[in-house]
Image (spheres, rainbow, N blue to C red):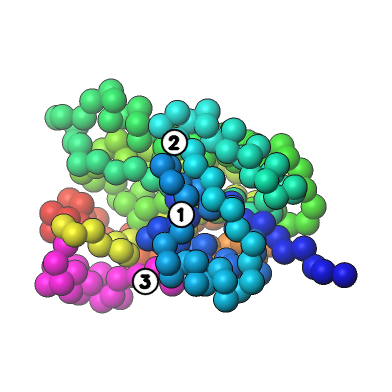
Amino acid sequence: MSVVRPLALVTGGCRRLGASIAAMLAGAGYDLALHGSHDAEPEPALLDAIGAAGAAWRGFVADFADPVSATALYAQVVAGFGRAPALLVNGASVFGQDRLDDVTAVDLAGAQAVNCAAPVLLTQAFAESGGVGDRSVVNILDQRIAHPHADQLAYTLAKLGLAGLTRIGAAGIRVNGVAPGLTLPTGDYDAAQMATLAARMPLSRLPTPGDIAAAVLFCARTSALDRQVLFVDGGAHLVRFERDFLHL
């Protein structure tokens, strides 16, 4: 008799940090429901990891700019796999460069929809769908929630809201958060700046995608852990940075 692998729904799970998280979960024995905002084709390294692990996977597309789509997404995942997820990783995010002097209602609504409202609705559906065994939610936050600054205001406010959900929790399931520091740079960073930023961290290093993925797996597997936030950031949350890393 074959053993049914637990199912993990990873939003934003097809690329970059989300793909690293999904790959580690596949290797740890999970099947994967992978969400993307406009397409759900995993990057090649993730496909290789899924194949090596023998995991089943399906891709699902939902644009969280309309957060109601999160509820529909969850129903599609349950229908597609014939069972409810045992793990929900809320990783999908949108960013911006707005500050108080130029942020707009559109900026605020867009960030809130994707970074906070959609995870709340997914957590609601997850909690209501039942299931057996130890079920948990892991919210991907940001080290800046420890010392918010003025950059990327709409994004920061939404992540603070998601951190609030993490602390509030939900009846019958475990809810925890992982707060990364600068991990996978965009093209705006060069090697010299990355080295300088690493040296400014209390641990003199930046986290790797593997560090973040391992923290997510720890939260998923540790049945006595609830409503906690793990900062995986080289110690960045211990320092009050006045600007976003991009501007340092």
Q: Is residue 157 left or right of residue 3?
A: left
State the SS at label 3: loop
Can residue 164 be seen in this snapshot?
A: no
Locate the N terminus by quadrant: bottom right
**At which x and y percent is residue 219?**
58, 62
How many residues crowd mark 2 within 10 Å: few (<14), some (14–19), many (20+)? some
The image shows residue 150, relative to residue 137, as above or below, that is: above
Q: Which span of residues is magenta-colored? A: 189-211
Instruction: Give the alpha-carbon distance from disc 2 to disc 1, as whole Å.
Output: 15 Å
User: Quadrant location of residue 71?
Assistant: top right
Q: Residue at the spot x=23%, y=72% of the render?
A: 198
- Label 2 to label 3: alpha-carbon separation: 28 Å
Q: Is residue 200 left or right of residue 91?
A: left
**Of the residues shown, which amino acid type is indicated by label 3?**
Thr
Residue 203 shows in this picture: yes
Q: Is residue 247 above or below residue 26?
A: above
Q: Secondary structure at mark 2?
A: loop
- Point out which mark residue 179 bears: none
Position of residue 173 measured from the top left corner of the image (x, y, whole percent)? 69, 48
Residue assigned mark 2 = 63
- Please tell me which of labels 3 and 1 falls first in the chain: 1
Magenta segment includes 204: yes
Amino acid on which the number 2 mark rests in the picture:
Asp
- Find disc 1 in the rendering and name its residue: 41
